[in-house]
Image (cartoon, rainbow, N blue to C red):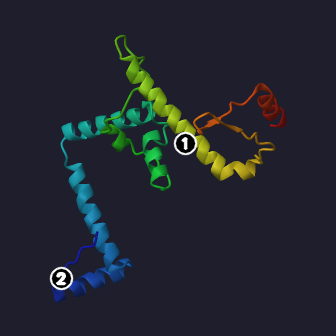
Amino acid sequence: MRITIDIPPDIEERLYKKCEEAGISPSEFVHALIEWYFLKKKKKSSPESQEFINVAIKTANERKLYCKYSDGNHCALEVLDDIFEEKKPEPVSPFKCLFCLDFQDRRKLPRKGVEVEGLENIRLKVHEIAKLAAKYVFEIYGDKLGYQPRMVVEVDEEVDEEGQAEERSISGEDLKKLLKNW
């Protein structure tokens, strides 16, 4: 944020003298003055508001550590969004976790009556995330890891009576060859 202040000439001269005596630049002096003002205001806050802030900080840190989608450093949902936007994943902020709508406490077991479909959808989403992660690892590090397929089995296409191409399934022999050459 940039703030412009018009200072009368006589005060400006005194400000420059004070800055020269202190050995700092005028911008640093103003910055220190603003910081002092807000620290003074913070100390004047009521004990109830300070207690509220402490509870909010504690709750935010707990949610960050015990969220189903968090490893304590990154949120899987945010990392997935960052991958699609081709951004570098950022560490999770506990205050984002405090207001997160997707928070699920991994310490609590699912209760009876929880829809199995809901759990199945979550498993499918996690499976999709794992497949995407494997794809990116293969694309980025495949050459470094030395992965080079030695043999590729070509699937012959058979033509049926209507002229449509049908793919032939891989036989047991083809599968054995692939596993042997892996």
In this rendering, is residue 25 above or below 182? below
Q: Residue 89: where, in percent of width, then height? A: 49, 51
Q: Quadrant of residue 30?
A: bottom left
- Which is closer to the viewer, label 2 or label 1? 1
Q: Quadrant of residue 47?
A: top left
Q: Amino acid at mark 2?
A: Ile
Q: Residue 87: where, in percent of width, then height? A: 48, 56
**Residue 73 shows in this picture:** yes
42 vs 81, nearest the viewer: 81
Query: Residues under labels 2 and 1: Cα distance?
Result: 58 Å
Left or right relative to 25: residue 151 = right
Q: Amino acid at mark 1?
A: Leu
- Residue with the mark numbered 1: 132
15 vs 138, nearest the viewer: 138
* Dot label at residue 7: 2
Residue drawn at (20%, 78%), measured in percent from left and top? Answer: 5
Q: Quadrant of residue 11?
A: bottom left
- As drawn, which residue projects farthest toward the left? 8
- As drawn, which residue projects farthest toward the front? 161
Left or right relative to 159: residue 77 = left
Quadrant holding the C terminus: top right
Quadrant holding the N terminus: bottom left
Residue drawn at (31%, 73%), measured in percent from left and top? Answer: 29
Element type where label 2 sits in the image:
loop
Residue drawn at (38%, 42%), measured in percent from left and top? Answer: 94
Left or right relative to 98: residue 45 = left
